[in-house]
Amino acid sequence: MIVCLMGVSGSGKSTIGALLSQKLAYPFVEGDDYHSPVDKHKMSQGIPLNDADRFKWLRNLSSSSQLGENSKELVVACSSLKKSYRSVLRDTGHLIIFVHLQGDLRLIKERLEQRTGHFFNPSLLDDQSKQLEPLGSDEKGFTVSIDQSIDLVVAEILGSLNDYPS
């Protein structure tokens, strides 16, 4: 199974994803690595990506060798803000379980403001939170609150993944 950690920037996708991949012994894929330099520059300047930008990024990610035909066990950090974006990833044909990392926007904003060396401009958080569509009842996945320790978040994810046969 492919576990896709989704949510707004600053929700902990990369940190939780790295730890979760260790616990599952699955490779970890950082979705941000598939953004173009142009899009990273836009975001660093506080310019939100549009749907065309995001679809291009998602196609780059979904067509990568990491998500290729032989990839059956992965943890992916990818915002996947809209259902239509998640469908690009589902079109790979793999079982993908989406884990929506959800939390208080004040906490997330604090995290973003303390983060260094990342291209994402914290001023874009409001745009991302407006774009975010929660998981639909027809999507495989669940929501986990990030308003708890990272270890508890990972433990909750691991427990919930038991509901999905790999």
Image: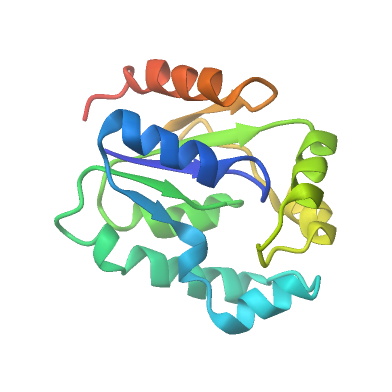
Given residues 164 and 111, the one toward you in this image is: 111
Residue placed at 54% from the left, 17% from the top?
152
Instruction: List x then y, in percent, for residue 62.
Output: 36, 63
Instruction: List x then y, in percent, for residue 83.
Output: 55, 49
Q: Position of 72 compared to 21: left or right?
A: left
Given residues 103 and 25, the one toward you in this image is: 25
Q: Residue 67: name its quadrant.
A: bottom left
Quadrant containing the C terminus in the rendered view: top left
> Residue 139, can we see it?
no
Residue placed at 67% from the left, 51% from the top?
9
Farthest residue toward the bottom?
38
Q: Position of 22 compared to 16: left or right?
A: left
Farthest residue toward the left?
70
Residue placed at 65% from the left, 62% from the top?
118
Residue placed at 25% from the left, 53% from the top?
93
Question: How many numbered marks does the figure carry?
Answer: 0
Q: Position of 96 compared to 122: left or right?
A: left
Q: Residue 40: name its quadrant.
A: bottom right
Given residues 148 and 129, the one toward you in this image is: 148
Quadrant containing the N terminus in the rendered view: top left
Given residues 54 and 65, the one toward you in this image is: 65
- The vertical placement of 75 against 22, above or below, is below
Instruction: List x then y, in percent, for residue 66.
Output: 27, 60
* Colouring used for the render: rainbow
Instruction: List x then y, in percent, for residue 103.
Output: 71, 31
> Residue 93, can we see it?
yes
- The vertical placement of 82 against 161, above or below, is below
